[in-house]
Image (cartoon, rainbow, N blue to C red):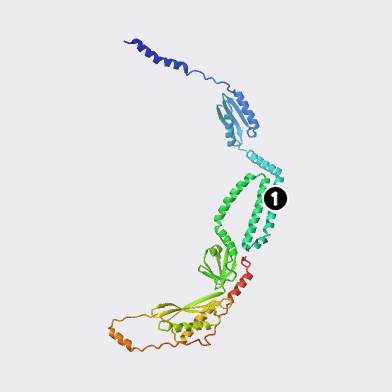
Amino acid sequence: MHYPLIVFIITLLWLPSIHSQELVDPGAEIQVTDVPQDQAIESRLTDILDVIESYEDVEVQVSSGVVILSGSVPSARAGRDLVALASRVEGVIYVQNLLSEQMDISTRVQPTTQKIQEMFNSLIRSLPIVLVAILTIIVFWLIGQWAGNRGTWLHRLGFTELAADLGERIIRILIVGIGFLIALQILDATALVGALLGVAGVFGLAVGFAFRNIVENYLAGVLLSARNPFSIGDAIKIGEFTGNVVRLTSRDTVLMTGDGNHLRIPNSTMITSVMTNFSRNPLRRFEFNITISANVDLSTTRRLGLTILQQMPGLLAEPAPQVLIAELRENMVDLTFTAWINQHESDFAKARSEAIRLVKIGFDNAGINMSEPIQRVQLAEPIESVAKEEKAQPDLPQPTIQPAVTASSATVDIATDPTMTKQLAKEISTSKEENLLK
């Protein structure tokens, strides 16, 4: 038997337990050095509370590192702050909170009253600086008003009334803004400038979205007054609307329709829509169509119609009237008559109406009848019987074309109609609404 080997192994296994028992003793006392005494902790906390006015009614007791706080505090927040303060003192193991909250009204109001008093005293001390800042803003505001009212140089540069007004407002705002920034610099509130600029940017963005249509119409009014596509009294057409221009405002354009009603169209619509100005060119062409039978001599008919238009008073010889063959259909021919007038001397609607009347009279005198719709009815009969019936019908006489229109039928009245002009003049003279058109 290897007894020595077994004894050696048992000895090796037993030695660690002996050393472990020697190193760790559960009943050994924990030694701590340089620990503050309870009296020192209590004295330290008492000195701190004596400095803070809100904790004058608080009592502190310390026993074995445990701090006991009793008494009253102004608010629950003040109690929590005091507990946090006491737990930060060296040597404190635990803080027991026995504090009660004061419910006296005077105690609650006193801090607010003190803050108001401090703010008032601070305002009194800074009153001279505030007065200088206010005076700076007033001076720059007066300078802005003076500069804004001296916008005649903008007119000299070719700006329109609305564009010049917009430029004057921008100049006034810039000058007042500079004065405001200087006032903030005097008040040593430069940090407020960045905040105000940020708020102004957000506010401007919100206002831009909220008043997008108003801004669009205003800017469109500036462009319309600069481009000047129409004048007062011009007959224009915007989309499906037609009327005479009464005025241009910063928001919309006012038209007077043919029945005397006021039509307001937003400036943004005016500048983005297709517009026809009938009055910008004094010369204007009218046209109308007449359908005649295809059996009539077209050359003679065209000469007759051209002669009637050339002899009609009020129509211009240059550009000359024309009679054109527009379309050839079954047993019918469409003729187009065109002629030019001077809108300053002749009325467009009257001239067109009289031209149609005279051509109708001339064609009637010449035996040229207006074509009527023809419908063919085919009967189920032998071709021979139909041919016999056609031979039995006599030939229709050809119309005799007269060379001209009689003198009585040529009497026309195409003078300009002053009705709309009088209504426009009355509207402009009686209305106090702004008008950006000259």
Is the C terminus in the top left, top right, bottom left or bottom right quadrant? bottom right
Please say if 51 is above or below 105: above
Viewer-closest of 140 and 429: 140
Judged left or right of residue 96, residue 122 is: right
Of the 4 image quadrants, the one containing the N terminus is top left
* Residue that mark 1 sits on: 136
For the point 71% across and 44% down, the residue is 124
The residue lying toward the viewer, choosing from 347 and 145, is 347
x, y percent for residue 158: 63, 63
Decide if residue 111 is on the left or right side of residue 388.
Answer: right
- Relative image position of residue 45 (x, y in whole percent): 61, 28
Disc 1 residue type?
A: Thr
In the displayed structure, 241 sits above or below 364; it is above
Q: Residue 48: percent from the left, percent from the top?
A: 63, 30
Q: Assess disc 1: are there few (<14), some (14-19) or many (≥20) residues with their C-alpha within 10 Å of its C-alpha.
A: many
Is residue 83 toward the left or the right of residue 303 in the image? right
Q: Quadrant of residue 268?
A: bottom right
Residue at 63% across / 58% down in the picture? 167
Q: Is residue 189 above or below residue 83?
A: below
Q: Where residue 106 sits in the image (x, y, percent)?
A: 64, 39
Q: How many marks?
A: 1
Circle 1 SS class:
helix
Please name whichever residue, 141 or 80, is drawn nearer the observer in this view of the structure.
Answer: 141
